[in-house]
Image (spheres, rainbow, N blue to C red):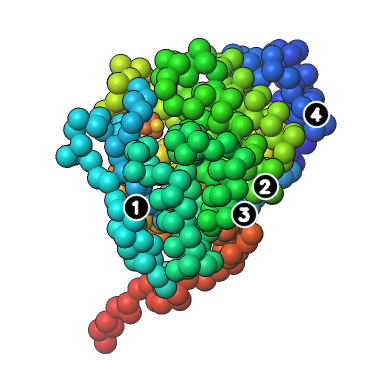
Amino acid sequence: MEVSDNFRVLLDNPRLLPELKDIAEKVLHNQRITFDEGVLLYEKAELGYLGVLANYIREQKHGDKTYFNRNFHIEPTNLCVYDCKFCSYSRLLKQRADGWEYTMEEMLDIVKKYDGQPVTEVHIVGGVLPQYDVAFYSELFSRIKAHRPHLHVKALTPVEYHYIFKKAKIDYATGMRLMKEAGLESIPGGGAEIFHPEVRDLIAKDKCTGEQWLAIHEEWHKLGMRSNATMLYGHIEKFHHRVDHMERLRELQDRTGGFQTFIPLKFRNRDNQMSDVPESTVVEDLRNYAIARIYLDNFDHIKAYWAMISRTTAQLSLNFGVDDIDGTLDDTTKIYSMAGAEEQKPAMSTKELVDLIKHAGRYPIERDTLYNVVTDYNEYQFADEEKPRFYKLPVIN
Ligand code: SF4
């Protein structure tokens, strides 16, 4: 069945609300939906309808291509001067003995552990502590680049940048320029949570505001550099807060074009101060991916972290607008598992990841941070596939 046939079935459904029919027509004709239409999708649209729309956009942009990358994580510390209510990862400073605080040399040792391995990116993000300042991170980035010039340094969020620039008494533009000169190549999407102060003030009060988060990305984009964006959803926020969040991102993206990927992050309620808040269902997760794909028409990619939502939901998400499922191949990140993610050991070999994507009927592509193709795995033969998978039975004559 052609994509347009799916649309025809949907548009011919006599029970479809006229407002949802209008939105479907807009998507079919590549027109942008409004704020109110975004809220309406959350309130009224059922999963099958959203899947048809989101998959149409996904296939227009990428066909069946589904991206992953090979990276490793460095988490400098799990201690933090902030106390976000949803954070299972931070340990209060008074329990300092339970945490870790890597030194510069320890972090460089982690980088060296990957010497000779085909990773393309190091992803550095963790808690906020005073000793990790502008001077520290500048030295860290430049020493990583000196050791391995082709390893892409994707590091820190506006939460850290706002803190270290304020401490150094420099403005965002100066700070981001210094980071770029030191070797920073892109910014991950974290720290965005929910921008709207009605929610942010309750769950992440003291760290950078939504406006400051956006301003730091804007300065980075002005330097010609790329970044990602996230949204922590499924806790105390209302649907209009989610749409407001995406609206602010869409508006900035119209002006700079610097965002690559939007990553919805599911709120998990284990071991944090919001354990009484129930988690979203898989259906709601898929609806949220789909609405993000529909709303953020100027974002190229929508990503789901397979380690966070489970392999099966990641496969399903590929029909709801997602075209990237990340690719951490070892267990260097503790952020997901400590927050109660589905995958407590987020390790998957390249072959497993490729099979996962192929079994969902998609086309696996290993990418680098900037979405250049590293390896096209659609026709790729893994060495162990060439070996016989059975032994000849002894024949008794
Ligand atoms: S979410 Fe980030 S800023 Fe907030 S407490 Fe956790 S580590 Fe610190």
Q: Quadrant of ligand 1?
A: top left
Q: Which residue is mark 3?
A: 370
Under circle 1, the secondary element is: loop
In this rendering, the answer to whether 149 lies above or below 201 is below
Which mark lies nearer to you, 1 or 2? 2
CA separation in Å, label 1 and label 4: 41 Å
CA separation in Å, label 3 and label 4: 27 Å
Q: Position of residue 211 (x, y in %)?
A: 59, 25
Q: Position of residue 146 (x, y in %)?
A: 48, 67
In this rendering, the answer to whether 218 lies above or below 274 is below
Residue furthest right in the image? 29
Name which residue type carries label 1. Thr
Under circle 4, the secondary element is: loop
Name which residue type carries label 2. Leu
Q: Earlier in the sequence, mark 4 or mark 2?
A: 4
Looking at the image, residue 376 sits to the left or right of residue 207; the answer is right
CA separation in Å, label 3 and label 1: 21 Å
CA separation in Å, label 1 and label 2: 30 Å
| Picture disc at residue 223 | 2
Q: Position of residue 309 (x, y in %)?
A: 42, 37
